[in-house]
Image (tube, rainbow, N blue to C red):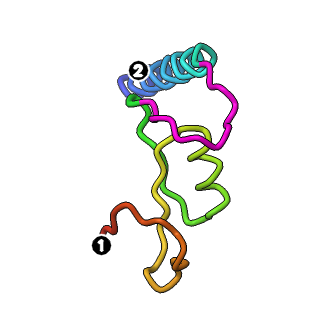
Amino acid sequence: TFRDTVWIVAFCQRLCLDVFGMLEYLQTVLPPADGTFIDGFDRWMGAFTTDPEECQRLFESRIPVWLIWKPNCVPADMTVIKEVEV
């Protein structure tokens, strides 16, 4: 039926995206984090998180990351590059 065809096409598209994503992941070599700042990969979208430890891990992996916190929860010694109102 048409419904089954749509489901099969969607499944094949998802499978192809999974395969291409895995191939991209396996071919991209990331050097170990050494604490210095290195520009992130421009083809990676990034992540949003509310967990500071996860934010640090993503940052050290050179993945763009946005830490979502209420302004009164941000420590005074934290460097804020740009504050965005949501």
Secondary structure beneath disc 1? loop
Q: Which residue is mark 1?
A: 85
Q: Which residues are magenta?
A: 29-41
Q: Position of residue 80 (x, y in %)?
A: 42, 66
**For the residue carrying disc 2, how many other residues have a C-alpha within 10 Å: few (<14), some (14-19), or many (20+)?**
few
Q: Position of residue 33 (x, y in %)?
A: 67, 37
In which quadrant of the rendered view does residue 66 lie?
Answer: bottom left
For image coordinates 35% across by 24% down, the residue present is 2
For image coordinates 33% across by 63% down, the residue present is 82
Q: Position of residue 57 (x, y in %)?
A: 65, 48
Q: Which mark is residue 29?
A: none
Label 2 or label 1, whichever lies nearer to me, is 1
Q: Which mark is residue 5?
A: 2
Residue type at mark 1? Answer: Glu
In which quadrant of the rendered view does residue 39 lie?
Answer: top left
Residue type at mark 2? Answer: Thr
For image coordinates 38% across by 25% down, the residue present is 6
Proximity of marks 2 and 1: CB atoms separated by less than 8 Å: no
For image coordinates 48% across by 73% down, the residue present is 69
Q: Confirm whether the magenta stretch covers residue 51.
A: no
Secondary structure beneath disc 2? helix
Q: CA distance from mark 2 to mark 1?
A: 44 Å
What secondary structure characterizes most of the magenta part? loop
The C terminus - image quarter: bottom left
